[in-house]
Amino acid sequence: MGRARIEIKRIENNTSRQVTFCKRRNGLLKKAYELSVLCDAEVALIVFSSRGRLYEYSNNRSQGRPWICCYQQRSSNSECIISAPIYCPSSIVW
């Protein structure tokens, strides 16, 4: 038998919520890494904790943050999904 399904709702206990966040964040970062390696995909992941701490993953460290500009350009124009990729310079300094 497999694991029982848990009900997806906010965890009220602060300690339990923090432990769950850490475990799931690490699992999510691992999945992002695996996706980038197995599928040769460009992956960028940004997670903010409830305390406002930033956790990020990019399979290409030198170009991770400029992907934000690419995302903003693509999401503002829905036609970009099916058109040619948008060029985003890697010379942007953050």
Image: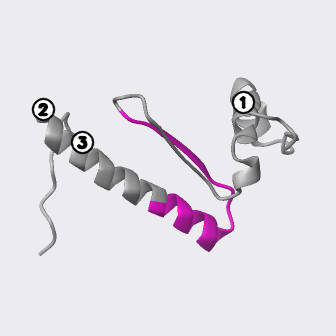
Disc 1/disc 3 C-alpha distance (Å): 36 Å
* Location of residue 50 in the rendering, given as x and y in whole percent from the top left corner: 34, 30
Residue corresponding to mark 2: 12
Residue corresponding to mark 3: 18
Q: Which color scheme does this rendered protein use?
A: one colour
* Location of residue 35 in the rendering, given as x and y in whole percent from the top left corner: 56, 64
Local SS, label 2: loop
Disc 2/disc 3 C-alpha distance (Å): 10 Å
Front in this rendered view, residue 60 or 5: 60
Q: Nearer the viewer, mark 2 or mark 3?
A: 3
Q: In this picture, is 1 found above or below 67? A: below
Q: In the image, which residues are magenta?
A: 30-49
Local SS, label 3: helix
* Location of residue 90 in the rendering, given as x and y in whole percent from the top left corner: 85, 44
Q: Nearer the viewer, mark 1 or mark 3?
A: 3
Mark 1 or mark 3, earlier in chain: 3
Residue corresponding to mark 1: 78
